[in-house]
Amino acid sequence: MSAQNTVRLTMAQALVRYLTAQHTEIDGQRLPLFAGCFAIFGHGNVAGMGEALYAERDTFPTYRAHNEQGMTHAAIAFAKQNQRRRMMAVTTSIGPGALNMVTAAGLAHANRLPVLLLPGDTFATRQPDPVLQQVEHYGAPSITVNDAFAPVSRYFDRITRPEQLLSSLPAAIETLLDPVDCGPATLALPQDVQAEAYDFPVSFFEPRVHRIRRPGLDEVELAAAIATLKGAEKPLIIAGGGVLYAGASEKLARFAEDHGIPVAETQAGKGSLRADHPNNVGSIGVTGGTAANALAEAADVIVALGTRLQDFTTGSRALYMDHGPRLLGVNVARFDAAKHGSQSLIGDAAVALDALAAGLAGWQSASVWQNELAEKRTAWLDIVERVTADDGSERPADSQVLGAVNRAAGENGTVVCAAGGLPGELHKNYRTTGPGSYHVEYGFSCMGYEIAGGLGAKMAAPERDVYVMVGDGSYMMLNSELATSVMLGYKLIVVLLDNRGYGCIHRLQGATVGVEFNNLFEGCNTIEAGAPDIDFAAHAKALGCEAEWVTGIAGLQDALARARANERSTVIALKTDPDKETTEGGAWWDVPVAEVSSRDAVAERRAGYDHSKQRQR
């Protein structure tokens, strides 16, 4: 290759230049595929990646964060809010900085969300071994802490020569964009190789526009799926995240209307239909409402549309499995389409809905089923209205708090949450306004995602008002990206519910063990004076936010109005009741109770567990 056809760059410079050249097309508009890179520098990436990012800072922004896990959550949330069509890179040093990202990598893997992880690594030459922060394996010197990324990455490679980028980097990008294999891609970067130069082909850096692949359908599978639905009288659709990622919400709305089919939503799929759509029967499963779960129990065909059917959706395979409805799995991934013995239709959700609509022209579900849809939907909405209303309590329930947030958010709001009891209440009771209005991480149920995720969602959609709902437990785990939101000017409205502990697991412990132990502060080992009464508003102010304490829902509503007028991120803290929850709806969840115990309360709960397990398919 002649010199004029090459450019001499370090491995890190080539990596950043390649990422800068990648673009995506959204609604006819060409945008950078990568919105930039979150970076916390250390000795393992500052000289190589730091120099390369500095050189491209005008076209490839670098964002400083305060915690490696937090900034990776933000990058993941950016991709989720963009429905996987845009993404970000994240770079750290070797050692603790890299390992701090592993939890976030697991989150991205479980949720099938794209993020490019670029942890520094030890020297490829091994000349200065062991370097600072290196973990040595005496019998396997090639192992570093970055090998921990392999089981939580969809693509993993260690770049030990600069020219390896020529094959590995495009492969990583293809993984990030693949509708089936989408998830985190990790390229471990030895710090000496980052700074090593190579004559890269100029053609490697030519701009490229990517479009998300829409897998087509097998004609035999399609014909079988149409026949299954034509034979159904009481079909139900479970809408998962695949509906949103395929941009199929409007197609789903028309399909459900035309054929008289109720649509239930998973956590990842919530917002596929607006809450006020007449065919939307709400949430399904362990955190499901009475309408969706009752219809699922009575359905003769259940269409799992773009969902991976995790245990919260199926009630640990006991909600609707035991009466034996026909399951039709419609999914881009063969692995998901065939779950639980489903009849498969493998392909993109939007493509599948178009094809099924054409094959089902003129067909509708039974009229009695459509009447049941309307009746159960109305009854459930009455429940939602009641449990989210203000009853004047000084320590309200989570459902009442989210009701106030829901009313304040309106058409332009996005609610962000993760882990604990709040996602269950949101799944049941939050009234969405369509795609982009509901952003809850529940595939990994990762405490600490909330605030960082809110930052990423706001970066993805700065025109939306982002409302973060977070419990005191999650806030204490990871709150530092509040300061990042202030520093970058991405305003969040954070509603912090202080129930003095881990309220969700406290309730689960009561249901399985029958005691309070080590969850609420009152059940923990403390000094005689007890656990401190944490001033969350003062803490948030110290991070640069506006902040205040309020009492009850009336106080919260007034504070939300003030927060909308603020220019900076605002934290509103209030005391809530750890024992109050929405008792309507729900389904059994397989959490094994001790088979032997000296306590009668445990034996009673074990008997109930054994009884419920008999329904499990």
Image: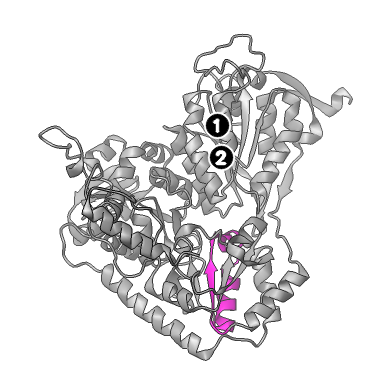
Q: Which residue is mark 2?
A: 152
Q: Quadrant of residue 464?
A: bottom left
- Number of the label disc, if any, that sits on residue 148: 1
Q: SS for tag 1?
A: helix
Q: Position of residue 453 (x, y in %)?
A: 44, 46
User: Which amino acid type corresponds to the residue marked 2 in the rendered image?
Assistant: Val
Query: Few, some or many C-alpha atoms within 10 Å of disc 2 (few <14, some 14-19, many ≥20)?
Result: many
Q: Position of residue 181 (x, y in %)?
A: 65, 49
Image side of residue 541 versus residue 14, left or right: left
Residue found at the far top of this picture: 128
Q: Position of residue 220 (x, y in %)?
A: 76, 71
Image side of residue 283 versus residue 400, left or right: right
Q: Position of residue 185 (x, y in %)?
A: 62, 39
User: Which amino acid type corresponds to the residue marked 1 in the rendered image?
Assistant: Ala
Would you say residue 255 sits in the magenta stretch?
yes
Residue found at the far left of this picture: 528
CA separation in Å, label 2 and label 1: 8 Å
> Which is more toward the observer, 401 or 488?
401
| Residue plotted at (20% across, 39% down) | 524
Q: SS for tag 2?
A: helix
Quadrant of the drawing holding the N terminus: top right
Regarding residue 277, the answer to whether it shows in the image is no
